[in-house]
Image (spheres, rainbow, N blue to C red):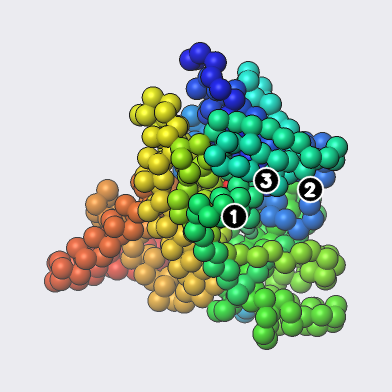
Amino acid sequence: MSQERDEIAVVGAGLAGCLLACFLARRGYRVALYERRPDPRTGTVERGRSINLALSERGLDALRRIGLDTQVMSDALPMRGRMIHPVAGESQFQPYSAAGDRAINSISRGALNNALLDAATALPGVRVAFDHRLVGLDPTTGEMTFETPQGKVLATSPVVLGADGAGSAVRGQLLGHGLLRESVDFLDYGYKELTIPPLGGDFALDPEALHIWPRGTSMMIALPNPDRSFTCTLFWPTHGTASFASLGSPAAIERHFAQHYPNLLPLAPNLVDDYQHNPVGVLGTVRCDPWQVTGRVGLLGDAAHAIVPFYGQGANCAFEDVVELDRCLDECADDWSAALPQFQRRRQDNAEAIAQMALANFVEMRDKVASPLFQFGRRVEHALERALPGRYVSRYELVSFSTTPYAEVRRRVRRQHRMLGAAGVGAALLLAGAVGSVLRRGRRR
Ligand SMILES: Cc1cc2nc3c(=O)[nH]c(=O)nc-3n(C[C@H](O)[C@H](O)[C@H](O)COP(=O)(O)OP(=O)(O)OC[C@H]3O[C@@H](n4cnc5c(N)ncnc54)[C@H](O)[C@@H]3O)c2cc1C
């Protein structure tokens, strides 16, 4: 542990902010974490706000570095593939990896946040100021203004880090001072949560899968929870026909689900109530530049680069940010004016790459996964991975089960596709072999 250093301000005690506090405290910094909400460990969970998320290798890698992976994983539910629910007919399981053994993990967002808060506050030098909403920031002096139940509070810090989420107030302050440009591209889609409670004390659906109801222009997904319920998330257009705006009465809601999600109705007794009372969340991609100003105010996580949730990577990416910032501080001997620009140089292309892959994955999840051609393609891809171990690796595998930088994932996947294309006859033969093995395996089942 190095000698005690200045107190760093981290705005936002969410997933990235708490993890960052842990990393900074381990470097010997004192950290003040400012959070607008009350302490979540004593309060109640907001209704209908994404109670679980999929944690994969990038997030786990960060947690391992602070020794929190085992604790977090003790309540995780591994999901080894997608279970596709068509409108009619049998559901179909599509494994995520060639050998079917790799899993992404459904975890409680609240429990993860609480575990990170506990870990941060257990470290010497970390203090958390709850009920502190940042409403003002002077980027040249580091003076912050917070709204609290007791009135306005001022604080000053030599380094202010915004980990305050997609609607970041720190980013807003930099924008207001003319120090940053931003674009926020909202989707014409929103999300709403529903619940499938346990059935006879057990999971109502296979708990080892991420369930998808692809419906072309929209979809629903469901992730398992440790209490044997599932949290379903509808991703629907906000306006137009078959949108959140188009369903009003309980009868219309039931009719719609009976027609498009027939296997859900008997499993979700509170569907109409959930639908009517749970909020519709917005979805969008945030881009901004720069991510830091004069080496004393910086942004990370969703505050710098919020993405749509369709690759299950937002939190994983935010955790990876923290690991990279820590690395930059190492390399820059804790000179923040060098480390923050270096962090942006290292992460910006990667954030853009996962932003684009996440958008593309929405089309895959809501539409393509249901097509027999797509399903066949995935089986061929897995056969190629088995035939060319380490040389052909699918995009999903690289994104979810490795820490290969996201921008490198895109380059590598393009290279692989070019290689297959250029190999021409060889590739055709390889594909034929792979297809043969898929068909043989299919016949053996
Ligand atoms: C429906 C949905 C599903 C998702 N599923 C996944 C998934 O499966 N896997 C995955 O990796 N990611 C997923 N994500 C993305 C993930 O939730 C985010 O990327 C992640 O929470 C970002 O962490 P963060 O700490 O940057 O921001 P946040 O988690 O948003 O935390 C920001 C914190 O800052 C606080 N704050 C905000 N404003 C202020 C202020 N003015 N002053 C003080 N404090 C403030 C907030 O209260 C909050 O505690 C999903 C997102 C959505 C919407």
When asked about the image quadrant of residue 48, the answer is: bottom right
**Position of residue 254 measured from the top left corner of the image (x, y, whole percent):** 80, 78
- Residue 335 lies left or right of residue 281; in this view the side is left
The residue indicated by pointer 1 is: 176
**Identity of the residue drawn at 82% across and 36% down:** 42
Q: Is 310 in front, or is 321?
A: 321
Estimate how packed mark 1 is, as few (under 14), some (14 to 19) or many (20 or more) residues with alpha carbons within 10 Å: few
- Looking at marks 1 and 2 on the same chain, the residue that comes earlier in the sequence is marked by 2
Q: Secondary structure at mark 3?
A: strand
The residue indicated by pointer 2 is: 45
**Identity of the residue drawn at 74% across and 79% down:** 245
Query: For the image shown, how many numbered marks are present on the structure?
Result: 3
Residue 49 can be seen in this image: yes
**Position of residue 23 measured from the top left corner of the image (x, y, whole percent):** 53, 29
- Quadrant of the image for the C terminus? bottom left
Mark 1 or 2: the one toward you? 1
Contact between labelled residues 1 and 3, with CB atoms less than 8 Å apart: no
The amino acid sitting under disc 1 is Gly
- Looking at marks 3 and 1 on the same chain, the residue that comes earlier in the sequence is marked by 3
* CB at disc 1 and ligand 1 closer than 8 Å: no
When asked about the image quadrant of residue 6, the answer is: top right
Q: Secondary structure at mark 1?
A: helix
The residue indicated by pointer 3 is: 136
| Image vertical order of residue 141 relative to residue 214, above or below | above
Mark 3 or 2: the one toward you? 3
Q: Is 415 in front, or is 150?
A: 150
**Identity of the residue drawn at 67% across and 80% down:** 239
